[in-house]
């Protein structure tokens, strides 16, 4: 759903090759998965359904294998979205809600925002700074469990979910592949974690 090439390019610059997954049989050669996306919730879930990947993604998560969501990918990890009527992947408890209307805050939220770490995770370990990342979104996840929230970003007078993490599944609402050196650094952290054996978090 949209930004596969830019994600591939970012990882290529970091010396990490990626393989596109088009059907369940492509998963056999994978050690970790990335679910990127731009666009709307329902068409993305329809695309996953038609590919036969939905139950395989749920099993991958339930078996605590490394999985990273980017932008719409984060939203698909949740139960449902105000944007559509289809069921999400249900990897995280909670729903995706439209960003609140606030005077002087246009929707979509588009531009740079500083991450506020809520708890360390492989994407943003304890020694990391609180970097600025590039966001483009009109909806944000609202995790049911506070322990799943890894980072937030300011949106007007409120805070929105910027990152979630549970076990070996994590996701970012922003686009690390479009966030220059700071985004590349977060991807380096994730690759380093994979190379260290992907120790379990939470």
Image (cartoon, helix red, strand yellow):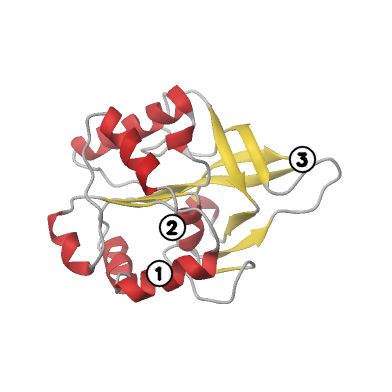
Q: For the residue carrying disc 1, how many other residues have a C-alpha within 10 Å: few (<14), some (14-19), or many (20+)?
A: few
* Residue at figure coordinates x 43%, y 48% from the top left: 3
Front of the two marks 3 and 2: 2
Q: For the residue carrying disc 2, how many other residues have a C-alpha within 10 Å: few (<14), some (14-19), or many (20+)?
A: some
- Which mark is on residue 156? 3
* Residue at figure coordinates x 59%, y 44% from the top left: 136
Front of the two marks 1 and 3: 1
19, 58: nearer the viewer: 19
- Which mark is on residue 82? none
* Residue at figure coordinates x 64%, y 46% from the top left: 160
Mark closest to the chain's N terminus, 1 or 3:
1
Circle 2 residue: 1
Task: Indicate the secondary structure of the residue bearing disc 3.
Answer: loop
Task: Indicate the secondary structure of the residue bearing disc 2.
Answer: loop
Q: Are marks 1 and 2 in contact (CB under 8 Å)?
A: yes
Residue furthest left as drawn:
29
Mark closest to the chain's N terminus, 3 or 2:
2
137, 171: nearer the viewer: 137
Q: Where residue 46 appears, x then y in whole percent?
A: 44, 73
Q: Quadrant of the N terminus?
A: bottom left
- Which mark is on residue 47? 1
């Amino acid at each position: 759903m949209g930004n596969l090439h830019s994600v591939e390019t970012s990882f290529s610059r970091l010396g990490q090759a990626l393989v596109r997954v088009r059907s369940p049989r492509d998963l056999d050669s994978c050690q970790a998965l990335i679910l990127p996306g731009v666009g709307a919730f329902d068409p993305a879930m329809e695309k996953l359904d038609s590919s036969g990947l939905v139950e395989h993604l749920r099993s991958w998560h339930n078996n605590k294998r490394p999985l990273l969501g980017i932008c719409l990918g984060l939203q698909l990890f949740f139960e449902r979205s105000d944007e559509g009527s289809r069921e999400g992947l249900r990897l995280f408890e909670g729903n995706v809600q439209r960003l609140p209307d606030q005077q002087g805050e246009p929707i979509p939220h588009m531009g740079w925002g500083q991450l506020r770490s809520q708890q360390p995770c492989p994407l943003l370990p304890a020694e990391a700074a609180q970097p600025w990342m590039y966001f483009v979104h009109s909806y944000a996840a609202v995790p049911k469990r506070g322990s799943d929230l890894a980072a937030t970003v300011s949106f007007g007078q409120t805070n929105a979910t910027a990152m979630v993490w549970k076990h070996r599944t994590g996701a970012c609402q922003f686009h690390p592949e479009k966030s220059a050196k700071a985004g590349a650094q977060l991807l380096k952290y994730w690759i380093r974690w994979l190379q260290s054996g992907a120790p379990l978090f939470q």
